[in-house]
Amino acid sequence: MSNTKPGRMFIAAVQRFSLIEYPGKISCVVFTQGCNFRCSYCFNPELIPIRKGIIAESEVLSFLERRRSLLDAVVLTGGEPLLHEIADFINAIKQNFLVGLVTNGSFPERLLHVIDSIDFVAMDVKAPPHKYENVVGVKISPEKIMKSISIIMKKAKDYEFRTTVIKTLSKEDVIDIGRMVEGAKKLVLQRPRSAKGVYVSPRESTEIEELRRKLERYVQKCIVR
């Protein structure tokens, strides 16, 4: 692993152990700095500004070398990992681990460049196209989002789409998201969380369950997480 030259990445933190980010696998989670979205409900707002040099790639690779017998996978999340040149880092960790990527889908060309090296992709689908800019707080072409969805459904080895059920999304908005990813193998409905990790439920559990059942008309599997 240490023989592979790392690319340019700005790493904010490493979660040494997770049973959630890569379904069915024990993973280490690497949080990159920086995000091009400004979602009001962001769970990791401290990652938005890029502060170079917090954690070196070499330090993370050395840690992973020591954990080879304890981990199945490494998941890159953020922030937005595709803001960075992650291909070399992926190639380094693929020698010993499965690789997961969590992305907001705003860089379809960069996603296409690395997707053959990724074992599992999770994409956050924030809103139906007409509400995207309102939810993410910046200008974004819905075509880019739809292109990323298409790339994942056609080329990803394994994947899931995730939608956080926030107050500004109506029931019909959430159903429209199901239509956006129609035919997908999995859609995950997520309750928003506070910065302290506490779930903030904008809707009753019965309403979320109703949405889950309706969404199963469009996707192979829909779960609440």
Image: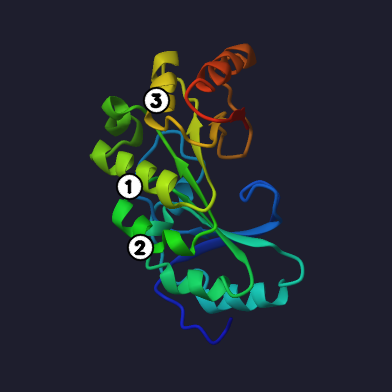
Query: Within 10 angstroms of label 1, few (less than 14), some, or many (20 or more) residues?
Result: many
- Left or right of 141, for residue 25: right
Q: Amino acid at mark 3?
A: Arg
Where is residue 72? Give x, y as percent.
Answer: 69, 62
Nearest to the observer: residue 192 or residue 222:
222
Measure the C-alpha gap from mark 2 to mark 3: 26 Å
- Left or right of 53, for residue 221: right
* Residue bearing the label numbered 2: 113
- Quadrant of the image occupied by residue 68: bottom right
* Residue bearing the label numbered 3: 179
- Residue drawn 27% across the image and 39% down it: 138
- Left or right of 184, for residue 85: left
| 169 relative to 107, above or below | above
Quarter the N terminus occupies: bottom right
* Residue bearing the label numbered 1: 106
**Cβ atoms at labels 2 and 3 below 8 Å apart:** no
